[in-house]
Amino acid sequence: MESANSYFLPVDFVIFGGILFVSASIGVYFAYKDRKVQTTENYYFGRRNVSPIIVAMSLSVSYISALTVIGNPVEVYLYGTVYAWTVVANLIGFIAASIYYIPLYHRLRIKSVYEYLGRRFHSRIRSFASTMAMLELTFYLGITVYLPSLALSAVTPLELNWTIALTSILCTFYTSIGGMKAVIWTDVLQGVIMIAGMLAIFIQAIIMYGGFGPIIDAADRGDRNNLFKLDIDPRVRSTVWTIGGALGLSSCYLSCCSQVTTQRYMSCNSVRSSRITISSGVNSLSALALEDFVIPCFPAMSTTRKMVFSKVMTVIFGGVVMGIAYSVSLLSSNIIQINMITGAVAAPILSVFTMGMFMPWINSWGALSGMISGIVCGSWVALASINQATYPATTESLPVSTNNCTVTSSLHNVTTTLSTESSEDTTALEPMSTISEEYGSVLQYTLYSMSPFLYGTFAFFVSIIVGHIVSLFTGFNKVSEADPDLFVPVIDCKILRFGIPEKSSEEIAENSKENVFINSCCTGDDCGQDSPDSPHNEKKETVF
């Protein structure tokens, strides 16, 4: 058992308990405050009038999760500062969401982001994509619950199993009773705490080592100052291209077609407010279950039953996420690499949105076949590479020897120098793959040795290629019959509209008036949904 000196001090327990209490109280407050507004519109979207600044802070916390705070320092320590290019990758997603996706979602006033796929292609594609997204999100949330629970178990007497349960139950509690407003405001609270903690560590490190100079020198000595690693070999794990470029595709999924983020976009009352934004996961899972599976089967369900179902499903999904977190705790692989496997599912979903919005000739068969092919091929490569990758640069980390390192203990004010008889003594790390001396088969040396940051890119392009091939053999859609509301040109010019008709100025003005009326007058569960006479509600196998 670890020394008690590594545990929280009494004041730490008081602060930690206070944070838990305030988080739970936020859920109770909004449950009481909105007790007379029992609608799914309020529960999932905060009546679409949440401040864009608050939503922006909540979205930031979605990106600065436990995976970022705990996982990224490990990634930088093992593979260097080249991982900083994730900033560029995230920027790609923000720009794409702001220019293309947010205006489309507000124009259609959808509740589930996968509702778009039902309008553009077919309801079955909507259901399949939503199912895959729920599986991906559940696994991702399991990782994000596991990491803070692991850290908590290291600084308290609680075992890991108990900290996982505590984290899961607390998040599920305030989410289930308070809805999206509780989620957003607890995100704000936790975001402030995380940022303050990271700043405190940063400042303390500067003080301890006497400025940036010694820290940069230490990074140079350990070969970690590799920010401009431009190797073009796709088997090299971390480079400018695999992180700054390929990882940008995963960022596009999170920013553009994940229910977690789009639900926040739709919590704002306008496109402009949402563009400012660029524990919610459980709330989003509940929203997907309701909007994509229950309401299509029971369209006449009452508001009361919708709310009961929403809260029950929130609790159920909270339990499922807790189970996933327990499962993740049993794995020995690198957490970042495990998270990249989810990209094999997320990227094909992004590809369907890409084909729907920018490629009007793709039909329903092409979209479905492409998505399935991308998920199968991407998952196959991602799972096989864990134990089959044989190219050394795919898995080898930077030197991790601690010989002759000076360590200062702030608890006992003691300075010691670590040294051993052998210069080969290094920190024991669990290998992420089996590397054979002969490199093994061609697949092991090539495809299975692909950088884990490329799993999503590989799956994305498989989906696009298969989507075009199947659409070719089953008959491309007639572009001239496309619904302009469901299409977004890459650049708004005649050539890149591919012959899709433009809406007249009268139609645009009429739609604007309708949206203003809905925003100002509609507060119930039917808010944002099309009227029975809306062309979007027509039963069509393929819109384009």
Image: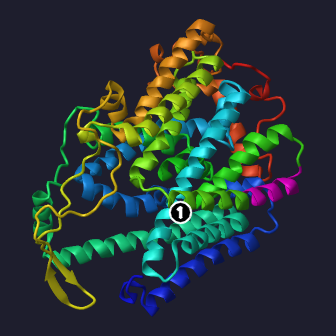
**Foreground of the two, 402 or 467:** 402
Relative to 212, 338 lies left or right:
right
x then y, percent, for residue 259: 60, 46
Q: Can residue 89 be seen in this view?
A: yes
Which element type, helix, strand or loop, lies under badge 1? helix
The magenta segment = 302-313
Give the quadrant of the C terminus: top right
- Asked if residue 253 lies in the magenta stretch, the reply is no
Amino acid type of disc 1? Val
Apparent side of residue 194 relative to residue 466 in the rendered image (left or right):
left
State the quadrant of the N terminus: bottom left
The colour scheme applied to this rendered structure is: rainbow
Residue 50 seen anywhere in this rendered image of the structure = no
Type of secondary structure dominating the magenta stretch: helix
Residue matched to label 1: 145
Is residue 396 positioned above or below 332 on the image? above
Instruction: Examine the structure image and report whether residue 307 is included in the region drawn in magenta.
Output: yes
